Image: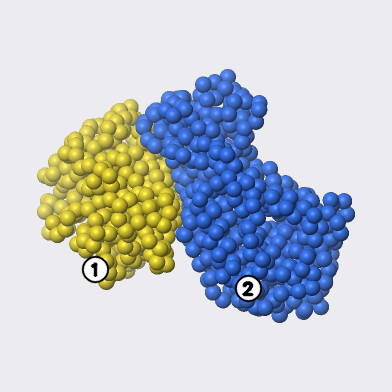
Chain colours: A yellow, B blue
Amino acid sequence: MPNPIRIRCFHLAVLLVPAALAAQSPPDTSFLARYRPAAGRLIAAATADTAAWLRVAELTDRFGPRPNGSASLERALDWVLDELRRDGLENVHAERAMVPHWVRGAESLELSEPWRAALPMLGLGGSVATPPGGIEAPVLVVSDSADLFTHADQARGRIVLFDAPYRGYGVTVRYRWMGAIWASRAGAVAALLRSVSPFEMRQPHTGVTHYDASARAIPFAAVSIEDAMMLHRMQGRGQPVVVRLVMSARTLPDAPSRNVVAELRGAERPDEVVVISGHLDSWDVGTGAMDDAGGFVAAWQALLLMHRLGLRPRRTVRLVGWTNEESGTRGGLAYRDAHARRLGDHDVAIESDAGAFRPTGFGFTGTDSAYALVRRIGPLLAAIGADSVTRGGGGTDIEPVMERGVPGMSLDVDGPRYFWYHHGNADTVDKLDPRDVARCVAAMAVMAYVIADMPESLPHPSNAPTRR
Amino acid sequence: MPNPIRIRCFHLAVLLVPAALAAQSPPDTSFLARYRPAAGRLIAAATADTAAWLRVAELTDRFGPRPNGSASLERALDWVLDELRRDGLENVHAERAMVPHWVRGAESLELSEPWRAALPMLGLGGSVATPPGGIEAPVLVVSDSADLFTHADQARGRIVLFDAPYRGYGVTVRYRWMGAIWASRAGAVAALLRSVSPFEMRQPHTGVTHYDASARAIPFAAVSIEDAMMLHRMQGRGQPVVVRLVMSARTLPDAPSRNVVAELRGAERPDEVVVISGHLDSWDVGTGAMDDAGGFVAAWQALLLMHRLGLRPRRTVRLVGWTNEESGTRGGLAYRDAHARRLGDHDVAIESDAGAFRPTGFGFTGTDSAYALVRRIGPLLAAIGADSVTRGGGGTDIEPVMERGVPGMSLDVDGPRYFWYHHGNADTVDKLDPRDVARCVAAMAVMAYVIADMPESLPHPSNAPTRR
């Protein structure tokens, strides 16, 4: 899932761009007539079976979670490369990227007062460790940053717990990103975070955090919503609240990893490229089925269906399975750099990274003229309810090429439960409905095929550092 | 929550008794007119604030989970006794019961193959331990008992996992109750259970199990629904599945505990008793807010409201906070024995143990003539939607006195999520809506007050071993 800062930009984009554009032009009937047969075949093939869901299950069952720097991620990448070749896809290869290598290690949070219990917790990605015996300290619970600044004089020597209620991921995740810095500036010895999720099931949710030069790096971990509220109530009642936090997390030297690539070469303009993608790394809890094995498999199966149905478009469709979405976007950055001179030939980069729930359509970021071209494709997806094409789309991994002018798109889904499971132990394949995963495949296939085949190339912004 | 066998009987009772009785008699308007003022005052007072929810929060926050034999349960009982006295209630005292003392100890389940991960697990109450180093063995996953018997020749030396989908608590909990025995008879070295819950959030759910003389006692633990399904898929795919189960559970000598009692003595017939109750013990995970701090507090606050409003009925209303609902009903049995000669004077025993969710009414078990008397009370609870009075009601703790002829009632609630949290880490007070807890108080107060005050005593069955 996109990093905190990026996702906020997308949300703003959705808000700021007038929706009026959507009503400008009538459906292009000749365009639709030309592509309806291929779209129908792709949709029928995608929704005929549960192959895509089974592939998500196999990928996640075979390798479990796939954290950056881990052997399991690299084994999963090897397996995907083998399967891509077995599928008969073209130009299957890996593209190297060095990724951050944070290792959780043993960790625990014990409530020492007013009673003893192990509280469910997850250290945040990138956090430093505690000393070996842990840090035992009284807790200062604050509701938000203002509350911390109001009570900053009470933070010194304490463990600060941010009990900030969920107000949307893009808003509340700021506490995960900034919490250790804010707490440290106030003199806290460690920080805890109410998990960034709208749903209470005593689950901690991890995710990346960071430090800066303004304050000493202190250990930072997520607790369940329930425990954040309970410790807050205890504080309000005047009960002593003491916890012992133990974390042995380590940041090792960057590790080698890879983006995986496969193609269907274009029949007429093979140097022009439509990228369809998802990421293969995950956090080290759950099995990363929603975030983002399902998204990658949707793109993978989309390419495979074009291949199997003999639908070879004019341009090349390139599948990319990104590494390192979760903690540095090194896969996306490596791709940008390796293909820097060819980005002008990238028509669009599409990413699916919001969970393979029921698709509703696509979000698009690019010029008005490019938007007008892709909007025509929406009606071809009406049969599966994925015909919405709106302004504002992208993804963490494709952001680096979007910043160079490549139009970006995201597969939009009806996934209100995404953040119930996100970055937690319950992100597992059973949460995905095989029919929805199949519809995601269909949506990715139709959108990518038609963009890759239509006569017009998608223009880049006139000021983009890419040609065209 | 009632034990597996009992809850099934209640369900059957609901099914078997013709609903026709419910339509026999028109509302008794003079009866309703007489009790409407008191009912209105109780409902208004109960729903005027969030005092009851705050008390559930305080009880669960102060003492945490309250497993049988623990110091935390006994400290909670001391606190409740003190509070009952501070509330000015009458005849506040404890009644001793010896309870089973099972201690979980350190435990873990590690997936060894096909990849390594700690899987969320909870040993089942009463389970034996593994040897100190644990038991590492290949897993045989079965869908149900028939599947085990079909593949019994493959169970020897393995850890059998029952991946039985949830088909209602009363049906599926049979695997928790019988699983260790069945697996052991087939030669398994340990057993695992897909948690008995309709909801997937990677949570294990504990609960009591047992052994019998037919097979060697083997360790038995619950895993999450997700992991049960995943191991099942792995087996189907031919992947090797090996786990290491470590449990250090111990069953210690029975420990002293107590039922807590408080009363509002009857104005005219103080020897006749209406019992309102919930249980104070819980499992050792979560904080037992739904199961059953909320139920006990609903009964407690009901008594307190009668006291505060000066509503002293003809008969005595007796609040009982049971010990040991979860693993032996020793509180209910001790009460039955201590009051054996007075059970004929018990008009009814009411228990609230289905979570303090929005109340819908009461279930009743007793004679037709007694049912006709209590049915008249329902309309007094129409204002809060709790006016349903149906056949079939009871509770684990009141079962022992019901077996001696005392009519039994349960507070019925609209709690489809009860089994999402039941016996797990997420059974915490935030799941309860303060307005619903207040309505539970109102329902318990009105039902108990009117039964305790109405001219007619509730008859016992003519063949009951109690007088009347």
Q: Horizontally, is B68 left or right of A107 in the view?
A: right
CB under 8 Å between callouts 1 and 2? Answer: no
Q: Position of residue B367 (x, y in %)?
A: 83, 57
Which chain letter matches label 2?
A: B
- Badge number at residue A315: none
Q: Horizontally, is A393 left or right of B273 in the view?
A: left
Q: Is residue A256 visible?
A: yes
Q: Position of residue B4 (x, y in %)?
A: 65, 43
- The residue positioned 34% from the left and 46% from the top of the image is A108
- The residue positioned 54% from the left and 41% from the top of the image is B102
Q: Quadrant of residue A453?
A: top left
Q: Is residue A353 visible?
A: no
Say what amino acid the circle numbered 2 marks. Leu
Measured in 3D between alpha carbons, the distance from the residue under mark 1 to the one under mark 2, in whole angstroms, is: 43 Å
Instruction: Using the image as rendered, state which of residue B447 and residue B167 is in the foreground.
Output: B447
Q: Quadrant of residue B327?
A: top right
- The residue positioned 75% from the left and 71% from the top of the image is B266
Label 1's element? helix
Q: Position of residue B356 (x, y in %)?
A: 58, 61
Instruction: Using the image as rendered, state which of residue B455 and residue B91 is in the foreground.
Output: B91
Say what amino acid the circle numbered 1 marks. Asp
Instruction: Using the image as rendered, state which of residue B309 and residue B353 is in the foreground.
Output: B309
Name the residue carrying label 2: B305
Name the residue carrying label 1: A153
- The residue positioned 57% from the left and 52% from the top of the image is B281
Specify few, some or many for label 2: CA neighbours under 10 Å numbering under 14, 14-19, or 20 or more: some
Which chain letter matches label 1?
A: A
